[in-house]
Image: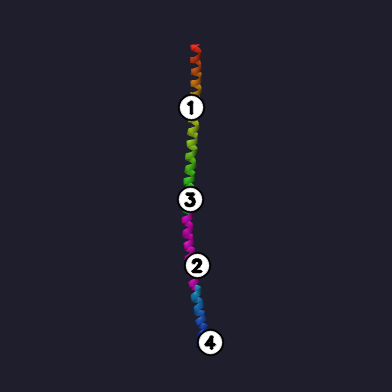
Amino acid sequence: MSEKDLAQLIEDMSNSLHTELHQVVDELRTEWRESADRIENAVGRNSKMVTAGTLAVGALNRSIARHDRAIKDLQARMRTLERQRRRKKE
């Protein structure tokens, strides 16, 4: 094998490796982008679920607070009626 043939072989191998390396890097970039897209979509879904859950819990808390106030009001009314009833008996 002549020096010229050896130089051509080295150059051909270098070009082939360079091309293969670029293909592998491009494939990895594509896979990373797809993975990042899937992660971004999952995070988006989870964020929406957390937001919806927060709104639902807030609504439940407000409803419970209204019911608690109504119960306290009814208890106060009952105490008043019981006091009035006891006074009438005396």
Q: Earlier in the sequence, mark 1 or mark 4?
A: 4
Q: Tell me whether circle 1 and circle 4 mark residues in contact (CB < 8 Å).
A: no
Residue indicated by mark 1? 71
Q: Amino acid at mark 1?
A: Ile
Q: Residue at x 48, y 39 (%)?
A: 57
The answer to if 59 sits in the magenta stretch is no
Q: Tell me whether circle 4 and circle 2 mark residues in contact (CB < 8 Å).
A: no
Q: Amino acid at mark 4?
A: Glu
User: Where 66 falls versus 5 (above or below)?
Assistant: above
The answer to if 21 sits in the magenta stretch is yes
Label 1: how many Cα within 10 Å (few below 14, some 14–19, many 20+): few
Inter-mark Cα distance, 2 to 3: 28 Å
Residue indicated by mark 3? 44
Residue 27 image point, x, y percent: 47, 66
Q: Where are the magenta residues, as a range?
A: 19-39
Q: Earlier in the sequence, mark 1 or mark 3?
A: 3
Badge 2 element:
helix
Residue indicated by mark 2? 25
Q: Amino acid at mark 2?
A: Val
Q: Earlier in the sequence, mark 1 or mark 2?
A: 2
Disc assigned to residue 3: 4
